[in-house]
Image: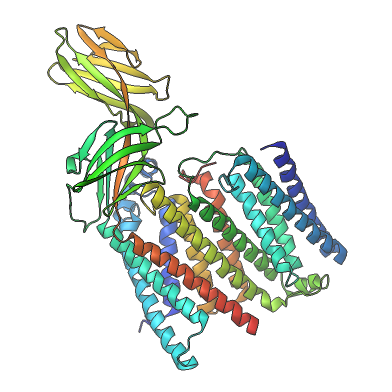
Amino acid sequence: MRINLASARLALVLIAVLVLYLVLSAVIPQRDIAEDQIINWREYLGDNYIVIEKLGLDRIYYTPTFFIVLGLLAVNLAFGNIRRLRTVSKVGGTLLKTRHVGSIIFHLSLILIMAAIILNFLYKYNGVLAMTEGQTLIDRPESYHREFCGPLYIDEYDRFRISLISILNNNKDRSGPGESALIIVQTGSSSVEKEISTNHPLKRRGLEFHYGLKSGYSPEVLLTDSLENILFHSFVRIANRKENREQFHRDFIVVPENNIHLEIEVKTDREPDIEYRIRAIQDSVVLFAGLMIPDDTVTFDGYKLSIPRLRQWCYIDVVKSPFLNLVFFGFWSALAGLTLSFVGRLKRVKEA
Amino acid sequence: MSSAQAILFWATTLTLAVAFFAGLLSLIFRKPGAFRWGVCLSLAALALLTVFGIVRWIQTGHPPFVTLFESMVTAVWFALLIFHLMRVRVMIIPVLLPLSLVSFLLMGWASSMPTAASPLSDALDNVWLFIHASFATAGAAAFLVAASFSTIFLLGESRYDGMARLAVRMPAFSSLPRTVLNFLIFGLILWGVMIVSGAIWAHAAWGRYWAWDPIELWSLISWLLYGLVLHSKLGWKLSHRAFCLMTIIAALTVVFALWGVGYVYETIHEYG
């Protein structure tokens, strides 16, 4: 059987397969997107869940078959346009009608979008910095809380040095963690200071610095022994942990020399009622369990634990999307093509 | 919702219900006068809804696109506007029936949502919100109008001829699929602008233009589904009946993408 790569029927089949894939991805929870639901599905399906994993249905957007469908669609669009150009030039001479031009622009733009999205996926970079007020970090692997890189992205560290001056709460009515961050970014010999917030990133030499989706308070924790020796002294950025499906803002500090395990959980993260639930354990014996607020000091078993002050912390996303402009150019040209095609169609109806 | 807004909202809902029943009665008893009343009432509903939108805009300080309630009401406004703009050129009175019914149902659904105005959060404080949200509601309205035309076509030629006797300047029954097709392409453009502007906005806000959020995903599914319907019609010469039926099915995915996803999934689009 001869397959016509330019055929409209092939396009229909491919679009239908793409729709089917997307509906499947909407029903079956996808990795990195709906982790909570994946736990539910695993519990519900038990060992049968392995079938979903084997078929790659829990990561549809990264399966080879998904890319094959997109690739075939691009080929079909390209061949379809070539055939359309040939047919139109044969029938109507060299002069193309508005609707033909619009349709060709639209379909070529779709190819451009697909190519740009794939290129962007291959070369993208997204690093998440977790920073506390007053902290300075250099662009190095150990500075990042998390990093997501495209398969073809080549590590380029030491691109910048970033200082988080302060986190600001612009809305005086709200008493929660801040909504914007004042940062200084130094690239090469030049540095720039800017307040970044949602919708207002800092763009610098191909990198974008976005104010992250999470922020909170870091208590300064000071633990000393009976001889006033400092056992632990640092700001603790309390992590968001999940245990038995419940969210906790909880962190642990371990002092190996004394085998002390400090558990700090946020009880209230809103000023002025910030409170922490603290448990100090040594050799499985609970030495202290109680609530502490900033400026509190407690003593137990010869140890002194205090929270002298608070600082705010936030995530700062460092983003590099080298082909983003090409993606957006494709989007707009596709819409322009579709509009031209629509206008041409209306004109034809009017003439008829 | 302030008392002025509540009065305007319920007056609109009631007017739409009466417009639907006027159309229905005229169809049953073959009274052209009742149809004309229905059209006038739907125009009154549009005027009331316009005033409602202005009052809410003034009282909240932002256009009525932010909450689910506002997006539903705005979609009804766009659908009524398209209907009455079209009415200037051709009498499309039969469309009044499905359109006023769907609009009434949407208003009823909207009333079950939290109606309190939501302040603009940092993420929403962007010019792209207005482009994104207005094109989303306008696109949904265009698809709903296309679905209304499809419904009329599916009722059959004899019923349509019966309705045609009630008005002058009615388009030919055979031209209805073409009108559906035009609205479908128009909706595709608007829906496309909605997706693109949403991507640009998401990049400005969070540094990523696409996150496979359920609303993003279902919007893309409905856009592709309309693409499929369009190509089936143009490339495969799908029958008019099948085409109209598919348009209605695709409209359901639009309704789900815009207003139903929040019932099933957790989504970052839940601002209201």
Quadrant assignment, res B42: bottom right
The image position of residue A128, as x and y in percent, is: 28, 42
In the image, what residue occupies the spot 60% across and 82% down? A348
| Left or right: A222, with B261 as reference point | left
Q: From the viewer's perspective, is residue A299 above or below residue A218?
A: above
Which residue is nearer to you in this view: A203 or A349? A203
Q: From the viewer's perspective, is residue A247 above or below residue A114?
A: above
| Left or right: B5, with A211 as reference point | right
The image position of residue B19, as x and y in percent, is: 78, 56
| Left or right: B49, with B265 as reference point | right
Quick one: which residue is furthest to the left in this view?
A: A257
Which residue is nearer to you in this view: A67 or A115? A115
In the rendered image, the quadrant that contains the N terminus of chain B is: top right
Which residue is nearer to you in this view: A272 or B263? A272
Q: From the viewer's perspective, is residue A319 above or below residue B91?
A: above
In the image, what residue occupies the spot 51% across and 51% down? B129
In the rendered image, the quadrant that contains the C terminus of chain B is: top right
Quadrant assignment, res A24: bottom left
In the image, what residue occupies the spot 21% across and 46% down? A160
> In this orientation, does residue B171 appear?
yes
| Left or right: A310, with B63 as reference point | left
